[in-house]
Image (cartoon, rainbow, N blue to C red):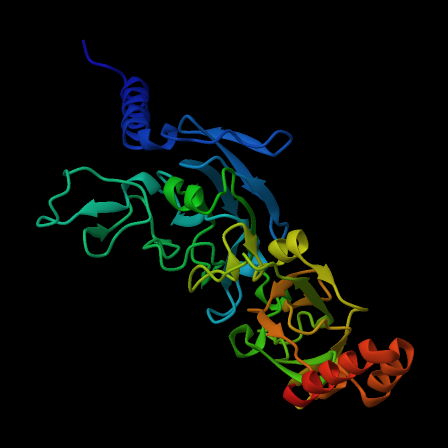
Amino acid sequence: CRASGRGRTFVVFVQLLILCATECGHEDIGLEPPAPGEVLSSLAGSNYTQLVEGRPVEHDLSVNKTRLYLYENINVTTMGLPDRYRKLILALEPCEGVVYLFVRRTRRCWPAPHTCCQPLPDSGLPPAFTSPPCSPQAHKIKCQWTHFHSVIDGTQNAAPTFFEVPLGSTKHLISVYAPYEANMKGGVKRPKYRLTALADIGAYPRPGLQGRLSAKQVADMSVELSWEEATFVPIGISGLRHYHVYSSLLLPEDKHTSGGVFVSLSKVMNTVCGLERNAVKYGRPLDSTACSGGQCKAVLSGIVPRRRYMFNIVAESHRGFHAAYSGVVVTADWVETSKLVSDTVIGLIGAICGTVFGVVVIGYLWIVKLYK
């Protein structure tokens, strides 16, 4: 007997579902369950969190696990913008530890982080895909079901990932993956991060000069910070509300561990959420009056000599979006070292001590003053 047209359509639909489920089977490998209370859904057998336009989410993640997200934008006004303005910002900020971002436009499957490191023929490695970070000398970096991703060769571990891509698709499938070895070496067992998707790109502040800061000592216990003012593209959507100055006294063991992170995997200081966790705000927020000719300045006082400090700037827009600069480490020192022991103090101590012991003390302090 022959199947009806409706029956054949149903059979084809079932076959497509089976094919899709087979091809997207990687979505169930090493998957982290969505956080309680999040907006959840189920597609192709995998749970994901729905990202809301312009609303950051902050999650933690087990090492060697992946969390899935879906961003959709069907705003007619946004899709009707000129190409130069019809873009999407995807920002992944590590708060602690190492996380990688993987993005695919449209369907069918979410990106597969566990397939990124493909052994080269002469590498001597087993012919099996592995998870990042990948070694460029031993692996070909090619992630399945992925259009673009973070730097995953280990050189930018714990650095923020910022993409501004053409908004040519209504759907973006996003995977965030936490590598095992990189985090365990840094003493991080459960990395934390903040993820933002924003199509209204003119609301996002962009740190000037790629976020570079400079510092110079202007007094015994004062340091002047300088930075280029933040910009907005396109102009007219939003503007600067405040600059926030963050500071932290660094410990001797706080060392710069790689080129992408400031200061370390467990103490990230070049992302907004990392600064909120590891530093404190200095003084009151600044506005555009702190800037002149595109250059902004702030003087920080009360710096203890011969101690290392971290300083950074966070730009805040009127729409409530934040962006961190790159940060700087400063060590203040005394301008005149002879002030450590003044003439008056030497005479006073000698008068108090008296006798032979006073003479010895005076002689010693004069020697200290002479050689300082």
Looking at this view, name the residue that lies furthest to the front.
356
**Is 162 on the left-hand or right-hand side of 125?**
right
Q: Can residue 175 be seen in this view?
A: no
Identify the residue shown where x is 43% and y is 58%.
Answer: 168
Between 241 and 185, the one lying in front of the other is 185
Q: Where is residue 38 in the image (x, y as percent from the top left)?
A: 61, 34
Residue 124 percent coordinates (x, y): 11, 44
Q: Is residue 121 left or right of residue 361?
A: left
Residue 101 drawn above or below residue 296: above
Residue 283 position (above or below residue 122): below
- Position of the C terminus, as image quadrant, is bottom right
Residue toward you, 151 or 76: 151
Left or right? Give the position of 340 relative to 237: right
Location of the N terminus by quadrant is: top left
Q: Viewer-proximal residue, 169 or 40?
A: 40
Q: Position of residue 312 (x, y in %)?
A: 63, 68
Answer above or below: position of 176 versus 284: above
Compared to residue 133, the image places residue 304 above or below, namely: below
User: Front-most of 307 and 178?
Assistant: 307
Q: Quadrant location of residue 154?
A: bottom left
Which residue is drawn at the image coordinates 43% and 31% (left, top)?
A: 31
Q: In which quarter of the image is residue 34?
A: top right
Q: Can residue 288 be seen in this view?
A: yes
- Residue at (27%, 28%) from the top-left corner? 19
Q: Position of residue 155 (x, y in %)?
A: 36, 59
Q: Residue furthest left?
A: 122
